[in-house]
Amino acid sequence: MSENVIITMIGISTLLGATGLAALLWGVKTGQFDDQSKFIDAARFDNEEELRDAVMMEEKRKARKKKKEEEKKKYMPAD
């Protein structure tokens, strides 16, 4: 193979690797891999009532988190 082909292959593979790394870091930052309790919850909440309770608890947790974020936005330090 000629040098140009090898340089092109190295450049493209580096670009693809950097793109994959950026996608992985984005996924970690945005919480795409934070489903730690999926299989545990499936075993623990095996009937409708318990599943409904788990969903309500999750919604309450999200509401608290959203409220906390809104409070942070409203905070203004003294001059």
Image (tube, rainbow, N blue to C red):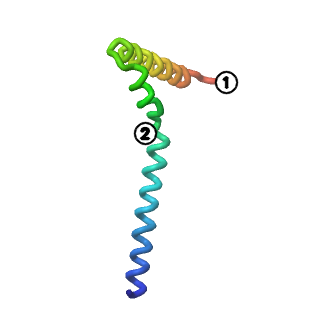
Find residue 38 and report its image quarter: top left
Report the label total: 2
The residue labelled by disc 2 is 32
Mark 2 vs mark 1: which is more N-terminal?
2
Q: Position of residue 78 (x, y in %)?
A: 66, 22
The type of residue carrying mark 1 is: Asp
Q: In the displayed orientation, state which residue is furthest to the left.
A: 48
Q: Residue at x 39, y 14 (%)?
A: 50
The residue labelled by disc 1 is 79
Q: Position of residue 58 (x, y in %)?
A: 43, 20
Helix or strand or loop: what does disc 1 sit on?
loop
Q: In the displayed orientation, state which residue is furthest to the bottom.
A: 2
Q: Quadrant of the N terminus?
A: bottom left
Helix or strand or loop: what does disc 2 sit on?
loop
Residue 5 in the image: above or below residue 75: below
Residue 31 in the image: above or below residue 47: below
Q: Position of residue 12 (x, y in %)?
A: 40, 69
Q: Residue at x 60, y 23 (%)?
A: 76
Q: Residues within 10 Å of mark 2 (few under 14, many from 20)?
A: few
Q: Position of residue 67 (x, y in %)?
A: 49, 19
